[in-house]
Amino acid sequence: MALLRRVFHRYRKLLAATDGVNTLYSSFYRCQCHYATTVTDEQQGYNSRNENEKGKWFTLPPFTATVDGAALGRELAGVKMDVKENSSNNITALKWIQRCCPELPKSLVQKLFRLRQVRRESSNVEEQRPKRVSAKESMIIGDRIFLPITVQKFPSEKVVEYPTSEEERKFVHGLEVYKDPEIIVVNKPPGMPVQGGIGIKRSLDELAAKYLRHEYSEAPRLVHRLDRDSSGLLVMGRTQISASALHSIFREKTFDTQNEDLKNKKRILQKKYWALVIGCPRRSGGIISVPLGKVVLDNGKSERITIMSDVRAPSAQYAVTEYRIIGSSGKGYTWLELSPLTGRKHQLRVHCAEALGTPIVGDYKYGWQAHRKLKHLTCSTSALNQGMQNPRQKTDPFSLRLGNGSISDKQPHLHLHCKEMVLPNISLALQQGQAVSDADLVDVESIKLVAPLPFHMQKSWDCLSS
């Protein structure tokens, strides 16, 4: 209609001309050409903007089939799945961004999805124009993700920086027990919290992010926990994939125990703790299988774990521990080797105190009554001299009081130490990737790790052996 109005408007002006008809056709042709030119210019401008649109985005590499850490962990744990899980079936857009850009804060990536600022260019669509994608949409091989170009200038998550010192660095590096491309294992000292929180100034995960990155841009990730006062082997994943695999292995260990034959089941993950307990169990060894649950005390101000008489209680959790006596003393103490087959909070401490009736030395939460009756033990001069030669006693940059806490002291530290651990070789399994079958994954070779006793437990050992 706009075109016709133009034509008739010009027609009235051209009636006075001598050659009206020819001029009318000529004018109509010029107007038609002008309209076509205008439309063509607009289309070219749109196409040009469309071609340059990708230049305003930060483009991630095309999605490729990679190993899904969680699925790999379940396969290593021997969990049977109906369909073999792999990365092409389970990797979401959110996970792919986190894998490609580990330096981006997770909160920022989630915010981009909420604001609908993430695009995906599908590989199986003829029109390769990026479209909005949600965080939970699965990726297909060849898909590309586009993020706002401003993410390149966005700083990574802020980490609280503490004054560094060469003494701290040497101390943390001295905790390393094992390291390969996928995992790092440390011998956690007693008294150091594993994870930060309210009232915690320094934690092992923060120190690992600071001193144990080595050549990696990612910080080591925790995959399991140890109580603050306990010590021993602590495993961390050096990459997101290895951390996911280890998470699954530790989790499946607990879930699998409920329905398996404990004696005939091949355990892909084995942990052995050493503990010094007050008294002596009635039997030299056995399996403790009693449910544990949380009880709230002092109007919600405190809580503790205890054995639940009613297995149907909502808070009751299946808990299994294998134990054996490795040394006894006529002085009222016994050394136990504890193998937790499940991973419940304070499981070993409660099983020793309530199921065996022999609380762990230094466990004042679950064995305070036994400690009230405990008599002070004096060590021989030879045992004291051996303790003075311990190098760890001289270096204590975090004020952990590592030179104290044996049974010769008035207030012993907790005598619970994760001494041995056997776990699958995650690095080898990831190298094999999808080229192996489920059966081969279960048969992947294992790594055996051993952590020496902390100073206070070694001193107690020397005292009881003298």
Image: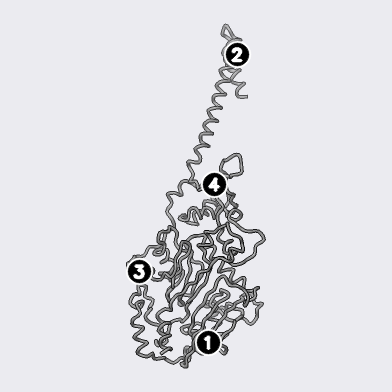
Dot 3: what SS? helix
Tell us which disc is closer to us: 2 or 3.
3
- Residue matched to label 3: 170
Mark positioned earlier in the residue sequence (1 or 2): 2
Estimate how packed mark 4 is, as few (under 14), some (14 to 19) or many (20 or more) residues with alpha carbons within 10 Å: many
- Residue matched to label 1: 358
Q: Residue 358: x percent and y percent? A: 53, 87
Point 43% across, 77% down: residue? 452
Dot 4: what SS? strand
Mark positioned earlier in the residue sequence (2 or 4): 2
Point 50% across, 60% down: residue? 240
- Residue matched to label 2: 25
Mark positioned earlier in the residue sequence (3 or 1): 3
Mark positioned earlier in the residue sequence (2 or 3): 2
**Closer-to-camera residue (109/242):** 242
The amino acid type found where label 2 is placed reads Tyr
Q: Residue 136: x percent and y percent? A: 59, 54
The amino acid type found where label 3 is placed reads Lys
